[in-house]
Image (cartoon, rainbow, N blue to C red):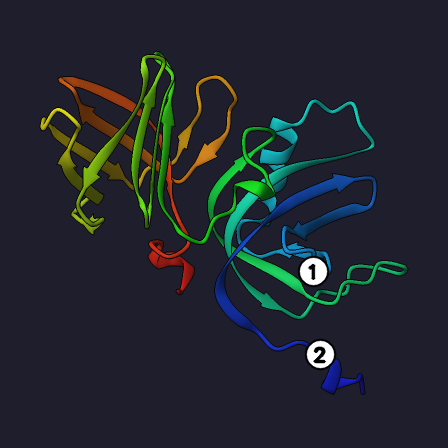
């Protein structure tokens, strides 16, 4: 019999951010917190490998993409001789993935919502300290109410610096950035200053019900 005392138990779901590294005989997830690499497993593992191949140029021996996922941690499979992982990440849900634009320095526990779009380039960041909306014309602080669930996803509303209404509608529909191909798990529409801005978004760790937090 094996060493059952050393076999990791299942835990989660929990949020994991890190780098999916794929190369010859290597498919592993390297967490941003510097902990030991994990074998990538679960119902989304094949989809994530295909997304990796789509986003990477294919010119390096080992190429990585940034992933932000919800996963359980469990015992690793019997991968093969000479390949040893202490545990596996059983991926249940993908928040975001990108070759560039996201990285381990972009992981913040106080984030509520991050959204962005093109034509024109714009971004919205909402954290526990407040909200900021940016366009090529500049940055403004928004006064937004709490994130609340609705029939299609989530909704936030409030006002801009001029007192005008601001609406943020988040729909549970996967979204790809039109330029970079980056993946986010939400499609967003922001109505502010008499204009409508469409793009992609993701929830922060404390506001994501799929993260088990």
Q: Is residue 36 above or below residue 189?
A: below
Q: Quadrant of the N terminus?
A: bottom right
Q: Are marks 2 and 1 in contact (CB under 8 Å)?
A: no
| Mark 2 neighbour density, 10 Å: few (under 14) some (14–19) many (20 or more) | few
**Which residue is rendered at x = 15% and y = 31% of the image?**
166
Badge 1 element: loop
In the drawing, does residue 66 fall left or right of residue 191?
Answer: right
Q: Is residue 189 above or below residue 126?
A: above
Using the image as rendered, state which of residue 96 and residue 49 is in the foreground.
96
**Which residue is rendered at x = 42% and y = 59% of the image?**
211
| Mark 1 neighbour density, 10 Å: few (under 14) some (14–19) many (20 or more) | few
Residue 171, x across and y down, in percent: 26, 38
The answer for how far apart the CA atoms under marks 2 and 1 are is: 17 Å
Residue 175, x across and y down, in percent: 39, 31
Q: Is residue 186 above or below residue 14?
A: above
In the drawing, does residue 145 fall left or right of residue 104?
Answer: left
Q: Which mark is residue 35?
A: 1
In the drawing, does residue 99 fall left or right of residue 170?
Answer: right
Using the image as rendered, state which of residue 125 and residue 8 is in the foreground.
125
Residue 136 placement: quadrant: top left
Residue 208, x across and y down, in percent: 36, 54
Using the image as rendered, state which of residue 138 and residue 42 is in the foreground.
138
Residue marked by disc 2 = 7
Badge 2 element: loop
Residue 180, x across and y down, in percent: 52, 21
In the drawing, does residue 97 fall left or right of residue 196?
Answer: right
Q: Which mark is residue 179?
A: none
């Amino acid at each position: 019999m094996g060493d059952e005392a050393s076999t990791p138990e299942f835990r989660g779901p929990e949020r994991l951010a890190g780098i999916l590294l794929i190369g010859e005989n290597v498919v592993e997830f390297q967490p941003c917190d510097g902990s030991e690499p994990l074998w990538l497993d679960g119902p989304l593992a094949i989809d994530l490998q295909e997304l990796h191949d789509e986003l990477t140029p294919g010119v390096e021996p080992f190429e990585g993409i940034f992933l932000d996922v919800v996963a359980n941690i469990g015992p690793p499979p019997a991968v093969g001789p000479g390949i040893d992982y202490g545990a596996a990440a059983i991926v249940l849900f993908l928040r975001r993935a990108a070759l560039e634009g996201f990285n381990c320095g972009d992981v913040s526990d106080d984030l509520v919502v991050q959204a962005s779009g093109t034509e024109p380039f714009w971004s919205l960041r909402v954290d526990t300290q407040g909200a900021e909306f940016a366009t090529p014309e500049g940055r403004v602080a928004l006064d937004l109410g709490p994130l609340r669930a609705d029939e299609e996803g989530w909704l936030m509303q409030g006002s801009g610096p001029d007192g005008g209404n601001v609406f943020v509608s988040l729909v549970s529909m996967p979204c790809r950035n039109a330029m970079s191909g980056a993946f986010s798990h939400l499609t967003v529409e922001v109505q502010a200053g008499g204009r409508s801005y469409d793009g992609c978004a993701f929830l922060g760790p404390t506001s994501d019900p799929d993260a088990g937090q």
